[in-house]
Amino acid sequence: MKTNTLKNLKSSVEYHADVVTKLKNGNYIFRRGFFYRNGSSAETFKDDIVGLLKSKFSGVFEVVEFKETWKAFSGRSSVANSSHWSVEIKVL
């Protein structure tokens, strides 16, 4: 998976993650915004992302952190500044 670019990661999880970002420490963070939870959680989002990555890549990675961030609705906010679930992965 180390040879795959951020663009490849984005295309593999499109429709599941709104934003994929490479952090300064080399890890990747996947975010998905929500207004209503509709029975989903940070853990179900993590399971979706991990399942997609395992099915598309043969590389080894580990989940560093997954969490839910809740923020009051503000129409024009980015995903990072709105309510969202996030999963941070480290490529081994």
Image (spheres, rainbow, N blue to C red):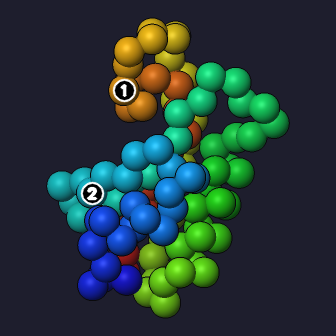
- Nearest to the observer: residue 43 or residue 21: 21
| Rendered position, 13 above or below 37 | below
User: From mark 1 to mark 2, how far is it between C-alphas?
Assistant: 17 Å
In percent of the image, x 53 and y 33: which residue is there? 33
In percent of the image, x 71 and y 51: which residue is there? 44
Residue 39 in the image: state x and y as whole percent.
Answer: 81, 36
- Nearest to the observer: residue 27 or residue 3: 3
Can you say which quadrant of the picture contains the C terminus?
bottom left
Q: What element carries label 1?
A: loop
| Rendered position, 38 above or below 51 | above
Type of residue at label 2? Lys
Type of residue at label 1? Ser
Can you say which quadrant of the picture contains the N terminus?
bottom left
Position of residue 10 in the picture relative to residue 26 (left or right): right
Residue 75 in the image: state x and y as whole percent.
Answer: 45, 11
In percent of the image, x 51 and y 61: which residue is there? 13
